[in-house]
Amino acid sequence: MDLEAIGKVKNRFDEPEDIKEMRESESQIIVDENYIEGLDGLDKGDFLKVVFYFHESNDYELKGKRREGKVRGVFASRSPHRPSQIGVTTVQLMEKDENVLKVYGLDAMNGTPILDIKPYSSWLDEPTGLKNLDNPRQYINTLVEKEKYDSILAKAGELHGHYCPNLSLGVIGGSYAMKKLKQTSIGMEDVIAIIETNNCFSDGIQYSTGCTFGNNSLIYRDYGKTAFTLIERKNQESIRLYFKQNDFLEKEYPETQELFQKVIVEKNGDKKDSKKLTKKWKQIAYDFTKKQPTNLFKIEKNPQIDKIPKKAPIYEDKYCDKCDEKVMATRIIKKEQTQYCIPCADETYIQLDGRGMIQK
Ligand SMILES: [Zn+2]
Ligand SMILES: [Zn+2]
């Protein structure tokens, strides 16, 4: 076997340190001049898989206590102490200057030999890229089962656009309820969520439960409460979670509350304030994932709920005589011999927006 170092790591970590701290700091990969042509095509912003050699690790245990305290086999861990001392991490390329790559996300110490660099590929590196996965939610189901709230939050952020406390609460509450009711969702209305708010919380619920606006498994009741009920249709088992720590901001993060007031409520903050809030919001979101759901929520099993509707019917299609667009039959407005869509008929309708359900 012939392995060659193609470069090495330069950063401020001469000793192994907290991985999170390392990943959040900048590292440089100094690529050997002989390989510089091989960097052609790498661009700022690209995600890369970096393969490196744990040069300071020498012994290993095939089975032993790992960082988080659990006993497990070396191949079920990311420990640097392993038979082949190879580490793999996904990083983001922030800048490329000839043979120097500035990256974020690397958890390798200063001086670590780099063995290889490959572009990250969602097709190859994301579990959802696996051809045998007919259920696109299989990976999320695994995370829910293992209560990996932080990993689910990371994914939910892709949908939501930012990390915030309410998104996190939705993720935790939704995941907790799914596990309690032993549910997985394939988006066919077998499991339903009744949501009582349309703030960030509802995106966390949609992501973690798979009950969404589009698959008709999400019922919106305009109560304006950070709460939801998960219902399993077959046995009518249900669970309601209501967020009970409403004073968490002033109690645990008073400076963030001031910032929130300034930036969001009074719309008075500058760019720096917004950036600071984004960072704080993310930190609180991740702090929540370390708490016990039972401390965050008031939890009720099989609460009293109004009858849930039957599975969504499929309605016939009709056409508006004025604009010729296809319309669901129940939304056609008949005026004398002519049929119209709602806007062409100038009829009232209900709109769901940031203010809740509004009659227009
Ligand atoms: Zn949000
Ligand atoms: Zn029309």
Image (cartoon, grey):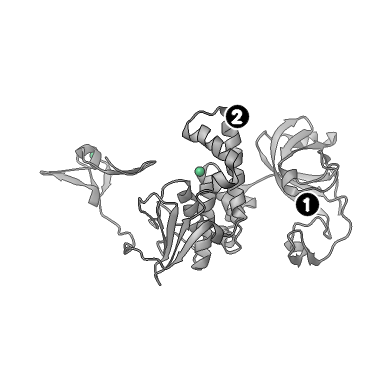
* Residue count near mark 1 (Cα–Cα under 10 Å), binned few <14, some 14–19, many ≥20: some
Which residue is at a point 55% across and 39% down the rendered structure image? 257
Looking at the picture, which amino acid does disc 1 mark? Gly
Q: Quadrant of the N terminus?
A: bottom right
Front in this rendered view, residue 322 or 37: 322
Which residue is at a point 59% across and 61% down the rendered structure image? 147
Left or right side of 359 for 254: right
Which residue is at a point 56% across and 59% down the rendered structure image? 295
Residue 99 in the image: x percent, y percent? 79, 32
Quarter assignment of residue 58: bottom right
Q: Is residue 353 above or below residue 55?
A: above
Q: Quick one: label 1 or label 2, which is nearer the N terminus? A: 1
Q: Quadrant of the C terminus?
A: top left
Residue placed under numbered mark 2 in the picture: 272
Residue placed under numbered mark 1 in the picture: 87
Front in this rendered view, residue 183 or 244: 244
Looking at the picture, which amino acid does disc 2 mark? Lys
Front in this rendered view, residue 15 or 251: 251
Report if the beta carbon of the residue with label 2 is closer than 8 angstroms to ligand 1.
no
> Residue at the front extreme?
251
Q: Secondary structure at mark 2?
A: helix
